[in-house]
Amino acid sequence: MKAAGIARVEHHACSLCGYMTSYVIEGGRLYFDSGCNCSWGGWRPAQFDEAADWINMQDRDDIRAKLAAKFGLTV
């Protein structure tokens, strides 16, 4: 994300309010923004292995590649 100049990668919409949760780079650190406050809210520190696990858990190669591309990666 840093090298590709990507500041935000959308994750999923909250099932209650539709707020788009996402991974965010701020000050060189990765955070997960779950900021809708429906069940929990705000940004929490995240690790890049968490994002990598999300990419690698995808069953389909095409989905995995699309998700990796959102982070500026190729698989």
Image (cartoon, rainbow, N blue to C red):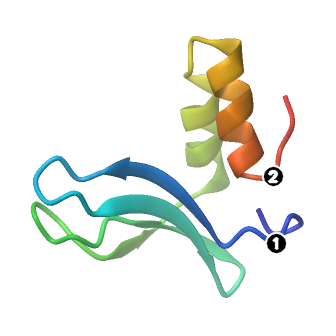
Q: Quadrant of residue 39?
A: bottom left
At 59% from the left and 46% from the top, the residue drawn is: 51
Residue highlighted by disc 1: 5
Which quarter shows the N terminus?
Answer: bottom right
What is the three-letter code of the residue carrying label 1? Gly
Would you say 67 lies left or right of 40 here? right
Q: Earlier in the sequence, mark 1 or mark 2?
A: 1
Q: Nearer the viewer, residue 39 or 69?
A: 69
Establish if 71 lies above or below 68: below
- The single residue placed furthest to the front in the displayed view is 18
Q: CA distance from mark 1 to mark 2?
A: 8 Å
> Residue 32 vs residue 39: left or right?
right
| Position of residue 15 measured from the top left corner of the image (x, y, whole percent) | 17, 47
Query: x, y (%) of residue 43?
Result: 38, 74
Query: Which secondary structure, mark 1?
Result: loop
Q: Are marks 1 and 2 in contact (CB under 8 Å)?
A: yes
Identify the residue shown where x is 10% and y is 64%. Answer: 38
Q: Residue at x 86, y 64 (%)?
A: 4
Quadrant in the picture for the C terminus: top right
Residue 72 disc label: 2
Residue 40 in the image, given as x and y percentages of width and height = 17, 65
